[in-house]
Amino acid sequence: MTDKKIKNITVAIIVKNAEPTIEKCLKSLDAFEEIILLDNGSTDQTLEIAAQFDNVKIHHSEFIGFGPLKNLAASHAKNDWVLSIDSDEYPTEQLIDELSNLKLQDNQVGKVHRLNAYKGKIVNGCNWNNDKIIRLFNRTATRYHDVQVHESINLENVKVVNLKGKLLHDAFDNASELLQKLQYYSDLYADQHYRRKNSGPWMIVFKTFVSFLDNYFLKRGFLYGWRGILISMSNTMGVFYKYFKLFERNKSVSNSLVITTYNKTQELDLVLQSVASQTVLPDEVIIADDGSTSETKELIDSFRDRLNIHHVWHEDSGFRLAEIRNKAIAKASKDFIIMVDGDMILGKDFIKSYILKVKKGRYYQGSRVMISEEASETLKKENKSSMSFFSKGIKNHLNAINSPLLSSLFSKRKKTDIGTKGCNMGFWKEDIDRINGFNEDFKGWGREDSEFVVRMLNSGIKRINFRFGAVAYHIYHEERSRGNLGVNDELLQSAIDNKLAFCENGIQKYYE
């Protein structure tokens, strides 16, 4: 083993309660001049042990996901070259010697073969044998993907070099630890893939069955006696629980229905009646009130025994739709925001169809069914809020069809803001916050929805035109004044030309 210190590579380790292995790990890294230890909440003797080593620098962070944590640890290094290892891993002398003389180009990364052991015996089966992982990289050329679990190095524009030395890994200490990590990683998997991947009972049964066959038979777990049985079953149950937890999480989406209004109590009354009649009620209803009189408040109060409803109001100071929407969304406590106007009567499955459809990384543009002027007056006169495909006085009847099958076939991705309708939209709240909500530089009617959508698209969120679902009926009204449309058009064009994904005058100030 080399006697000289390795000065050009920093070792980065993430730890939490690693008392059983940390001393052995750090002793195996004595050849390195700098070790960054990033702790995320140890309550045992891990940090006391680590403090005894002169080459260790301790930093702290809460858990933010394994990918982000490893990037954060690398950022504390004095060197650009970083060797990322776990607190229960130990480089062989061959790997240490190799690293001390290694000459890599900045656009290369080093892949290491990891040997996994259980209770002192290396297991070359149960999917443990072909464990080759990239652990050496130059932080100026690449980094870890920002994911919660199963983190990996971004390989775009870099070349992988296989290192000859090996890492020894004490994978688990006992069966209880296996179960703890199984629960922990399956929780992280469900969080990471929530509403991004599908999961269902029959798929879970199939994947679980195949996993055991693969681990115990195809990957030779049967050659390792009781260790092979334990590891194969643990891997199999990990598959079962991660997909089942994802299935449970995907079954429901916490949602806030935001309804904009301004002095239209008759219309709002019909809309709220349709909300209260939903087959699946929204988790909360937030009325974004752009300065209505007390009559609107009294109407909202009359629905409090039927809906979890909140009234967000500001003084009447002209058309300030962007501002009142931001204020209402900032008050929302749920993950997904469904936004409609206060003259949109909702079909009975409106909320349900959104919940069945939505996936992360997307926003949804719903459509509307137009109600004629005569039919709209009749609805208000009779105080009737029940609408369907067969209702009289509606136009564009195709938009009134609610069919999950047709929706899956005809809902398509669109790449522009053309056809934006703020009267029926759905967004993840985290995406709204990322682009800073609606741009409050918009005053007067027009284009605030389109500019919001442009920034959403520029931030990488896909637009899905939601067809044959989320059916809503638009009560007739005369068009608003377009006196400020010229200025608003300029704001929209600026967002398009400059590929803006963020506005300065947005929602963030309401969180402060």
Image (cartoon, helix red, strand yellow):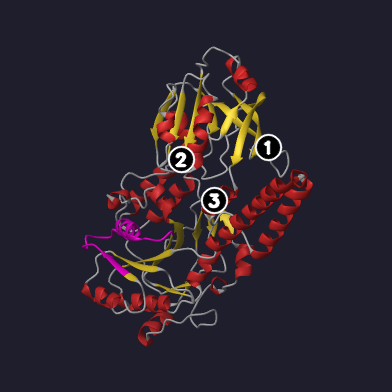
Label 1 element class: strand
Label 2 element class: loop
Cα–Cα gap, marks 2 and 1? 25 Å
Residue visible at 52% across and 43% down?
Answer: 147
Cα–Cα gap, marks 1 and 3? 21 Å
Q: Is residue 487 visible?
A: yes
The amino acid marked with disc number 2 is Lys
**Which is closer to the viewer, label 1 or label 3?**
1
Indicate the quadrant where residue 276 lies.
Answer: bottom left
Q: Earlier in the sequence, mark 3 or mark 2?
A: 2
Indicate the quadrant where residue 164 lies.
Answer: top right
Q: Which residues are magenta?
A: 310-335
Residue on which disc 3 sits: 180
Indicate the quadrant where residue 413 lies.
Answer: bottom right
Depth check: give the residue in front, 441 or 117: 117
The amino acid marked with disc number 3 is Gln
Residue 351 in the image: x percent, y percent?
Answer: 48, 70
From what the image shows, is residue 256 above or below residue 232?
A: below
Residue visible at 60% across and 14% down?
Answer: 101
